[in-house]
Amino acid sequence: MALLNSCEKEDDGLKNKTAIKFEANYQTLKSALLKSANATEVVVESFKINIEEIEIEFDSNDPMFLSDSVATDYEMDGPFEVDLMKDGNALETTVVKNVELPSAAYEEIEFKFRESENPISDMYGKSILIEGTIDGSPFIFWSDEEIEVEIEFEEFVYLDEASRAVLTVSFDLASLFNPALGGIDITSATDGNENGIIEIYPEDPDGNSDLADLVWEKIEDIIEAFEEKYYN
């Protein structure tokens, strides 16, 4: 993993050590039972993503920087393969620790989903992978699409030389497949080839690819970012 600042700036010695964490926000420790309007049960058991890079953006109006020396962002190169849920349990993962950022106000975090190139990973060729059950029948959703997500922090993050901050990216998995919370109703997905698995992905053999597009488009809506308390 490499940390790259996109613009040159004189080193003023004001460095902090920041961690970046990805987490799932779920209703219970075990996978919540989500019900659609027709009462079909949807259970999420596993949720994985593959991130190519992460960027932290400065507030462009930050008075701590002169107009001719403002850095625009810091980039952290991956790939980062992140488990957000396993065996029905929501997870949190510290993706990077002790990142040194200049004292500044930060307004946004960006990251890019990209398909994994790790041939020994079950994420190989995928940028997102979700598994679970629909009314007791196993389903699998995945995509190999690349998208760049820009998430503004709930409030500006102000870091100085004494900061030990955690910048958290949170996925509200409870709402993804819950129509009552604005999520996608996947209960119409079918096992078209009758192989015992409901497959939801681009050009899948079950005829659910249109539904797969809707799920992928919803992902950005379930993400938020914020600063947590200091860490050791």
Image (cartoon, rainbow, N blue to C red):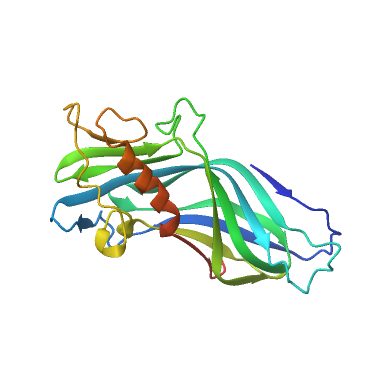
The relative height of residue 71 versus residue 86 in the rendered view (above or below) is below
Q: Determine the residue positioned at 69% across, 53% down.
A: 74
User: Splitting the image into 4 quarters, where does residue 156 fall?
Assistant: bottom right
Near-viewer residue (86 or 109) = 109
Quarter of the image with the C terminus in it: bottom right
Q: Is residue 222 left or right of residue 9?
A: left
Quarter of the image with the N terminus in it: top right
Spot occupied by residue 30 in the image (x, y as percentages of width and height): 25, 55
Q: Is residue 150 left or right of residue 70?
A: left
Spot occupied by residue 166 in the image (x, y as percentages of width and height): 56, 63
The relative height of residue 172 versus residue 52 in the rendered view (above or below) is below
Near-viewer residue (70 or 168) = 70
Spot occupied by residue 75 in the image (x, y as percentages of width and height): 67, 49
Q: How many marks?
A: 0
Spot occupied by residue 220 in the image (x, y as percentages of width and height): 45, 54
Q: Residue furthest front?
A: 210
Is residue 232 among the parts visible in the rendering? no
User: Splitting the image into 4 quarters, where does residue 70 fall?
Assistant: bottom right
Q: Is residue 150 left or right of residue 172?
A: right
Q: Determine the residue positioned at 34% across, 56% down.
A: 173
Is residue 118 among the parts visible in the rendering? yes
Near-viewer residue (208 or 112) = 208
